[in-house]
Structure formats: C-alpha cells, structure tokens
Amino acid sequence: MDMGSGTGGGSALLALAEIALFWSATVVHLLRLLSPTRLPDADRPTDAGHAVMGVGMTLMVFPGVSVGTLHAAAAGYAVLAVAYLGRTTLTLRRSAAQHRCQNAAIAAGLGAMAYMLADPTHPPAWVPLGVAAVLAACALVHGRRLIDARHRHGATVGAGTGTGTGTTAWAPQMLVTVPHLGALLMTVAMAAMVGVAGS
C-alpha cells in the first residue's frame, strides 16, 4: 500500500501540490501559535496538534525520505494521538463540547498519521476504509469550526469598528479563518489518500 506520492513514483506535480498544501497548513498554525495578538478561539495545544500533523504529512509525501524515518515518525505520532485522546478524556467535564470534539478530531488525525506513516503492506480492506471514514468525520468537525470562526470574526470586527476597542476585533483574518480552512483541506486530503490507497 502506497500513500505517499513523493515516495511512490507518483506525479511530481501532484507531490508538489501536496507538499505546498501540507506545509502551508503547518505554517499558518505556527503563525497562529506565535501571534502576539489575542485571537478568538485560540488554543495552543490544538494549533500545535495541527502544525505537527502538517509536518508529518509533508514528511510523508516528500521525495527521498527513508522508510526507517517514516516508521520512527509513525511511533511518535501514535504517542501523540494517545496524549490528545487523554486530553479529550481529562477535559470531558471542564471543556465545552466543541473543544472536546476538536481534541478528539486531532487525536484521530494523529492516529491516522501514525497509520499512514507506518504504511502497512497488506492491511485488511476494512482498515483503510475505516481510517478514511474517521478522517471524513474529522473533516466535518473542522468544517464546522471554520464556519464558526468566520461568524465570530465577522461579529468581533463589526463590534470593533463600532467601538474601536477589543484586541480580538482586529485579529488578522488569515490567523482566524485560514488555519481552520487548512485543517479542513489537510484532513480531506488525508481521507482521500487513505481511501484511494485502500481501494
């Protein structure tokens, strides 16, 4: 089973497009983490999880990366998936349902990353299809987050133009909505790659 176009002799143009998508998603989440402006719905562990996922996807499709490196990364992502799953469990009573869903989606995404980097040779047919289905569900979570972020950003900017106060009113849109769009596109791409490789 081959999920990395960069390592499997696929189209160079496709590999370049994948690298651009995954690395761009990484960069916008890093910028969000480093932003001095207080951003609405900012959550450092969530942004860190998406940034790490983007790094993993870039590594997977980058040409010339050794199998040993990918397998070592798979072990690291499996550990991270367990850590985020634990974070979801520990915050069941303290966090809003939306944040719990986001943490669960990141845990699932990291787990899928571990599976994709491990790249099992002959998995049962239901395994990649199940992973793709889970990623599709995660994409729905990210899509909802994107819609909510756009609405919140519009509301805060409208309030800010009326009063001239509030740090969140002037948060750059690139760091409010684009990271959610990047997470959505990256998750959809992951689901497609797993589904195609398993078919």
Image (cartoon, rainbow, N blue to C red):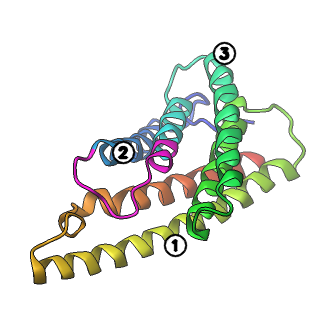
The segment highlighted magenta reads: 35-49
Q: Which image quadrant is residue 110 in?
A: top right
Where is mark 3, residue-wise? Answer: 68
Residue drawn at x 54%, y 34% is: 56
- Would you say the magenta stretch is mainly helix, strand or loop? loop
Query: Which residue sits furthest front?
Result: 94
Where is mark 1, residue-wise? Answer: 144
Residue 125 appears left or right of 146? right
Which marked residue is nearer to the observer: mark 2 or mark 1? Answer: 1
Task: Pick whichever of labels 2 and 3 is earlier in the sequence.
Answer: 2
Closest to the observer: 185 or 107?
107
Where is the N terminus found, in terms of image quarters?
A: top right
**Would residue 193 be visible to someone looking at this image?**
no
Q: Is residue 197 above or below residue 99?
A: above
Q: Is residue 8 above or below residue 68?
A: below
Residue 131 appears left or right of 158? right
Where is mark 2, residue-wise? Answer: 24
Task: Pick whichever of labels 2 and 1 is earlier in the sequence.
Answer: 2
Which marked residue is nearer to the observer: mark 3 or mark 1? Answer: 1
- The kind of residue tagged 1 is Arg
Q: Which image quadrant is residue 97 in?
A: bottom right
Disc 2 from disc 3: Cα separation: 25 Å
